[in-house]
């Protein structure tokens, strides 16, 4: 019996290793291809015959006036604004739905949850017309406002689950001490939401960083381009600059990878326990 269990474990581990190797192979090819000169990109060799940083050096300088450094700064400005806005406004909205009593609360919460079923493509035309009439096209505000006005139904729902799980006796004790409603939120509720706040921050960061669709829709000036739009500049009607594209796309994912792996524990905790609260 013991030998059978050992054999099963061996086969399980071998199978997992093979599947992992199969899934990670395209990523390895991507990494190694970014160090290949243009003439080697079509070769079947995984490792470069001649290693070079040419793709990174030339790819960083998109034009004489624009570099990917500018695109990174533009993207970070958008992303950090979205992260702060989503963390604050979604927790504030969740506090209202999870703790306060007001007229038609359940109805409005149901309306918020119903927006989860609406694809973004359904509302994109009306949103663009609204932002255009407000004179916000070709600015970052259309990319920031959705995150700064509640952050979206998913973030609110995630927060509500945690807020409902916090004992209400803490609120009552704070009220006896003379705390206002906002002070209860800031001093009692918010410090206890570390896990969901981290999860919301990571989601807001990655979604904002990868939001190519909205960026290409609202931003038209190259000086305001984000990393995603900067990568698109390496593709034109006549040529795709594969070496530069591979190198810069690899660089573009580094911030998201650093954030995820450094805060992975809080992220997993927030997702795993969100369905257990309330």
Image: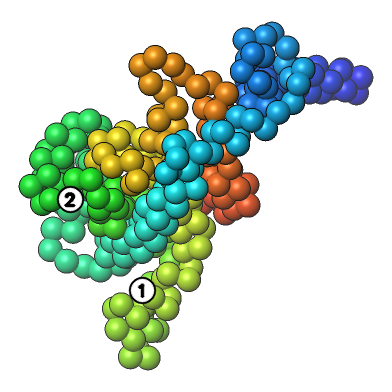
Image point (26%, 39%), residue name: 220
Q: Is residue 41 left or right of residue 102?
A: right
Asked if 148 appears above or below 127 in the picture, the reply is below
Nearest the eye: 250 or 1: 250
Q: Is residue 235 left or right of residue 102?
A: right
When asked about the image quadrant of residue 87, the answer is bottom left
Image point (43%, 43%), residue name: 66
| Residue located beneath label 1 in the image | 185
**Residue 135: x %, y % from top left:** 13, 50
| Residue located beneath label 2 in the image | 136
Q: Which mark lies nearer to you, 1 or 2?
A: 2
View extreme (bottom): residue: 177
Q: Earlier in the sequence, mark 1 or mark 2?
A: 2
- Label 2: how many Cα within 10 Å (few below 14, some 14–19, many 20+): some
Q: CA distance from mark 1 to mark 2?
A: 32 Å
Asked if 105 appears above or below 258 in the picture, the reply is below
Element under disc 2: loop
Residue 264 appears anywhere in the view: no
View extreme (front): residue: 64
Quadrant placement of the N terminus: top right
**Residue 269: x %, y % from top left:** 56, 51
Image point (64%, 30%), residue name: 54
**Residue 254: x %, y % from top left:** 58, 42
Image point (35%, 46%), residue name: 223
View extreme (left): residue: 133
Q: Which mark is residue 170?
A: none
Residue 93 appears anywhere in the view: yes
Q: Is residue 227 left or right of residue 180?
A: right
**Residue 91: x %, y % from top left:** 36, 62
């Amino acid at each position: 019996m013991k030998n059978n269990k050992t054999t099963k474990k061996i086969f399980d581990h071998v199978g997992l290793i093979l599947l992992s190797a199969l899934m990670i192979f395209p990523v390895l090819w991507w990494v190694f291809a970014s160090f290949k000169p243009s003439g080697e990109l079509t070769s079947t060799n995984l490792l470069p015959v001649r290693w070079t940083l040419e793709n990174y050096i030339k790819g960083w300088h998109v034009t004489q006036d624009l570099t990917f450094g500018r695109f990174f700064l533009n993207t970070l400005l958008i992303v950090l604004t979205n992260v702060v806005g989503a963390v604050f406004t979604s927790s504030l909205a969740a506090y209202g739905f999870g703790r306060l009593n007001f007229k038609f609360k359940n109805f409005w919460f149901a309306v918020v949850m119903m927006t989860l079923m609406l694809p973004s493509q359904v509302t994109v035309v009306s949103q663009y017309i609204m932002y255009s009439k407000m004179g916000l096209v070709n600015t970052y505000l259309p990319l920031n406002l959705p995150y700064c006005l509640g952050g979206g139904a998913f973030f609110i729902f995630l927060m509500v689950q945690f807020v409902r799980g916090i004992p209400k006796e803490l609120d009552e004790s704070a009220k006896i001490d003379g705390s206002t409603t906002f002070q209860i939120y800031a001093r009692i509720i918010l410090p206890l939401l570390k896990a969901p706040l981290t999860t919301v921050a990571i989601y807001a960061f990655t979604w904002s960083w990868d939001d190519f669709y909205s960026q290409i829709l609202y931003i038209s000036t190259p000086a305001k381009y984000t990393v995603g739009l900067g990568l698109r500049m390496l593709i034109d009607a006549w040529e795709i600059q594969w070496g530069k594209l591979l190198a810069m796309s690899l660089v573009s994912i580094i911030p998201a990878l650093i954030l995820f792996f450094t805060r992975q524990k809080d992220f997993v905790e927030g997702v795993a326990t969100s369905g257990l609260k309330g």
